[in-house]
Amino acid sequence: MSATLIILAIVGVAFFGLLIFSRDFRRWLGDTLTAIGLLIADAIPTVGGWLRNIIRVIGGIIGIYSLFLICATLIALVLIIVALLFNSPGFTAFAFVWAISTFLLTWMPAGIVMKVFRVNKAVVPQQLRFIIAWVAFIGFLGMVHPDVLTWKSLLGFALFGFIWMATSAKFNAIDRLIFPLVIIMCLAAGWEHFFPDNYRATTRYAVSWGKRLDTMKDRGSINNETDATTTYAVVLRDVNTLYDFPAEGKPGTGIPESITKNLPKGTIVKISNHKQEVKEFDGQGFIRIQLANANGSFVLGKKHWIEAEYVQIATPREITPKDDSLLPSAKNQPKTPQPPSSGQTSMIGDSIFTKGVYDIDVNGKTPFVIRVAASKTGCEKYSMRVKQPRDRSDGYDVLYADGTPPVHDAPGISTVFPNKQVPRFQLAANIPTTVELTVN
């Protein structure tokens, strides 16, 4: 039996091979079949006419069925298009139900024939049921949320369905994805219908949490962008000379020109462009810095080159640290007065005060270090006085960071503050006192 099957398989393969690759064999086979048909028609005219009638009837039935299938498909497509244009939930549901029902009715005869001849295992194959389920889901979505059903979303669902059909992974999307999603949407629709206030309040609360998270991310983005935009530097030693490099194409290109400029140790400068590479000349690295204007701002300040090792890179928050004590929430919290201390103080963080007049609230000891930075060179000029309460104030102490003896100032006392290139100090008072700082 197995030998017979092998021989039949070889013959079958040879037959189909000749049918595909041999034009002469196909011509011979066609002529032979035509001759056999003519012989049957001449020898048995009744049988030949009967066969022709049967073929004609079958062709007519197939033509009518095909025409009906095309008409039903066009009607369903027109209804879906009209439903999308009107965007009516009820009409959308009717259009999709009509389209799916019409398609199933027109498919039934072909499905039954293919199942009888064992072409398909079911009248409606799995791939076709998958497509019908996706179409039904889109119609349900258009009925529950009509605003979601647009041409763009409809084409997106169609493309997603095609991609899903082409995947090789075995995943029952109908049972595991679409059906649970439909159940959740039905429950949400019932919740909205029977408990409208509860649904509204809950969705509003969820949306407010989303807005809060978005705002938190935006605030974090502002902090990150602030830190990423600007780069500062601190001069590590007294510098008397800066440099300028001529532009390309000028005589002596690449040879720096020295400029006399005094930058005391501790001067804050800004890196002109932190994306710019360190320029090398004669084995020395140079970095371009921007100097502050007379008002303390770096905007449109003069730019020069300095030896790269003479500066220490600093972030914006290292130059201007955060001070939570200035927030109203921190000011409302009770503070424990601390007695003024003598000698060198422990520096917490610098707050830079440029040219201007400032009111500083002192209750115990200031939690920040006051750093006076007004002029570009020379000693900084500053003065202080008790602003309030003048009637019962015992004054305040100025505690310098470099170990200079503390200076006491009070109403009615003519106090002389020591001259320093970079004054850094804290203020301390036994009772809450407002000190007016004037930076010239």
Image (spheres, helix red, strand yellow):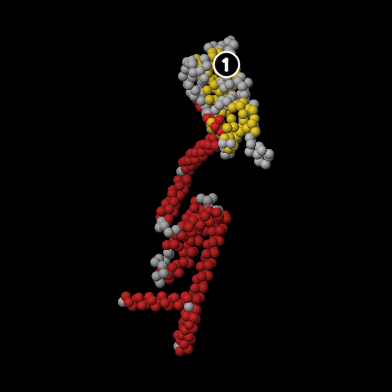
Callout 1 amino acid: Pro
Residue wearing tag 1: 418
Above or below: residue 152 compared with residue 113: above
Judge left or right: residue 69 versus residue 381.
left
Quadrant of the frame with the C terminus: top right
Q: How many labels does the image show?
A: 1
Residue that appears at 46% across and 77% down? 19
Along the line of sight, which residue is nearer the eye, 366 or 87? Answer: 366
Image coordinates for residue 320, horizontal then vertical, percent: 55, 28
Corner quadrant of residue 227 = top right
Residue that appears at 48% across and 42% down? 203
Judge left or right: residue 298 versus residue 195.
right
The residue lying furthest to the bottom in this view is: 43
Image coordinates for residue 7, horizontal then vertical, percent: 36, 77
Q: Element type at marker 1?
A: loop
Above or below: residue 343 compared with residue 308: above
Corner quadrant of residue 17 = bottom left
Image coordinates for residue 41, horizontal then vertical, percent: 47, 86
